[in-house]
Image: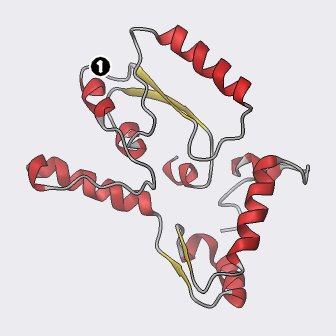
Amino acid sequence: MKSFLRYRDLPSFCRSSDMEDPSLQLVIRETQQSTRAQALILNTFEDLEAPIINHIRTRCPKTCTIGPLHLLLNTRLSMKKSQEASSIPQYSNSLWKVDRSCIEWLDRQPSRSVLFVSFGSITILTRGQFLEFWYELEEATRERGYMVEWAPQEEILAHKAIGGSLHTVGGTPLWRV
């Protein structure tokens, strides 16, 4: 299991040698806050991270692993395909309101013709960087693209129209590779 993940496979904040890195600082703050919790629920599983989970339990004995949650969503999506869509509620593991209008747009696109671009829930960009990226993407895809504030990522990545993706990498996308 030691060679399961390579150094280069880790999110960039895990590879940073700069202790002032904004992403690393966010993780540090969240970790410090977690020490005040009475219980922790982690989106991971024992076989992947047993040593670190055991260490966390020395600080917070009530630590439960319930992941990977995206596999639960994938199971629900598979069930949806085999039953009437109206009889199954829409599921999401997101904390944000999901805009599903993009799925209808994807259904009208040729196979493997769409690039999915996602910033994720935690992205460190200046306002200027974000606006420049958004403007260039909007200009390059005018009349050919579709933008939503928050999308059903797992469903989109599994869609036949998706030919590639560009997104920030946290821990969860590693499981999708």
Residue at (76% x, 72% y) in the render: 32
Crowding at mark 1 (Cα within 10 Å: few <14, some 14-19, many 20+): some
Say left or right for 80 vs 64: left
Q: Quadrant of the N terminus?
A: bottom right
- Pinpoint residue 45: horizontal percent, then vertical percent: 53, 72
Instruction: Decide if residue 149 is on the left or right side of residue 37.
Output: left
- Using the image, determine if residue 61 lies above or below residue 82: below
Secondary element under disc 1, as helix, strand or loop, is loop
Task: Name the residue nearer the viewer: 114 or 6.
Answer: 114
- Residue 172 in the image, given as x and y percentages of width and height: 55, 54
Q: Residue furthest front?
A: 127
Front residue (pair 105, 81): 105
Residue 135 occupies quadrant:
top right
Q: Report the number of numbered marks.
A: 1
Residue 59, compared with residue 31, is above or below; it is: below
State left or right for residue 54 relative to residue 94. right
- Residue position marked by numbered label 1 in the rendering: 109
Task: Give the quarter of the image for residue 92.
Answer: bottom left
Q: Is residue 126 left or right of residue 99?
A: right
Residue at 49% in and 49% down:
176
Where is residue 142 shown, x and y percent of the image? 45, 9
Which residue sits at x=33%, y=30%?
102
Which residue type does callout 1 highlight? Answer: Gln
Q: Residue at x 39, y 19 (%)?
A: 113
